Amino acid sequence: MSFIVEQFLLVLSFLAILISTQEIASKACACYNQGICDPQTGSCICPAGFLGRQCEQSQPTTLCNNVVCKNSGVCNILSATESSCWCLLGFHGEYCERQQAASRCTQVQCQNGATCYEHSPGSSVFAYCVCPPGFTGRFCETEYFRCPQAGTFADEYKCAQGFYFLCDYSNRRIAGRCPRGLRFNLMKMSCDHSSTVTCPNK
C-alpha cells in the first residue's frame, strides 16, 4: 500500500511541477511587435527589426544603406524587409530617377471644389479627384446629396463604410464617419452595429 501511495505522490509532484512550469511559460510569453510566443520555452521569437525578451526593442535596420534615392528623394522603411524611395513632387520611379514633364493634375478637371492628387506607384503616375461631401464621379461632377434642412442624414453611396452627413442652418454639409464596423442608424440617429442597419440599394 505504501508503494502505491509513494508512486501516487511522485506522479502528483511531477504534475505540479509541469503545471507551474507551463504557467510561468505562458505568463512570460507576452510578445510585442508581432513577436511569436514559443510556449515550450516561454520566450518570444522576434520578427526582423526587433529584439529583446518580449521583442520590445527596436533594432536598427540597414534596409536604406544601399538605396540611393535621386533628386532629393528620401528612403523610407515600409516593413522589416521592404524599403521605398519617397519622391518630391515632379519626380517618380523606383529611385525618383524620372522627371515628370508636367503635373498630371493640370490634365484633370476636378469639379465642385474637389481636390486633385497625384499618385506614383512604381514607374506609373496618375491623378485623381477627392470629392467634397455629397459629390461623386470621376471628376466629382455628380451631386448626390443636398441638405434639405439642418440635421443628420445617411450617405446613400457610402453607407456601408459608415458615412453620414451633418447639415447646419446655412445648408453646409460635413461628412461624418462611424467607427470601423459600425454604420449610421437613421432610426436611432447614432452609430450602430452594421447588422442592424440596412443600406439603400445603389
Image (tube, rainbow, N blue to C red):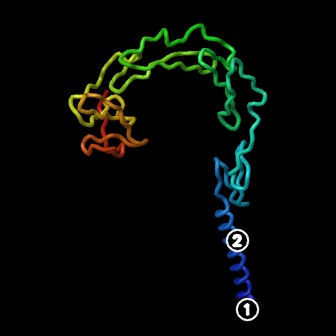
**Amino acid at dot 2:** Leu
- Outermost residue on the front side: it is 170
The image shows residue 95, relative to residue 2, as above or below, that is above
In the displayed structure, would residue 42 be above or below residue 71? below
Give the quarter of the figure containing the N terminus.
Answer: bottom right
For the residues labelled 1 and 2, the Cα–Cα distance comes to 24 Å
Mark sitting on residue 18: 2
On the image, the x and y values in percent for residue 110 come to: 41, 15
- The residue lying at 34 percent from left, 22 percent from top is 135
82 horizontally vs 101: left or right: right
Above/below status of 183 relative to 105 = below
Considering only order in the chain, which callout, 2 or 1, is on the residue closer to the N terminus? Answer: 1
Q: Between 45 and 103, which is closer to the camera in this rendering?
A: 103
Identify which residue, 9 or 154, lies in the foreground.
154
Residue 115 percent location from the top left of the image: 44, 20
Count of numbered badges drawn on the protein: 2
Q: Position of residue 155 (x, y in %)?
A: 32, 31
Give coordinates of residue 80: x percent, y percent: 69, 38
Q: Quadrant of residue 191?
A: top left
Residue type beneath disc 1: Ser
Q: Secondary structure at mark 1?
A: helix
Residue placed under numbered mark 1 in the picture = 2
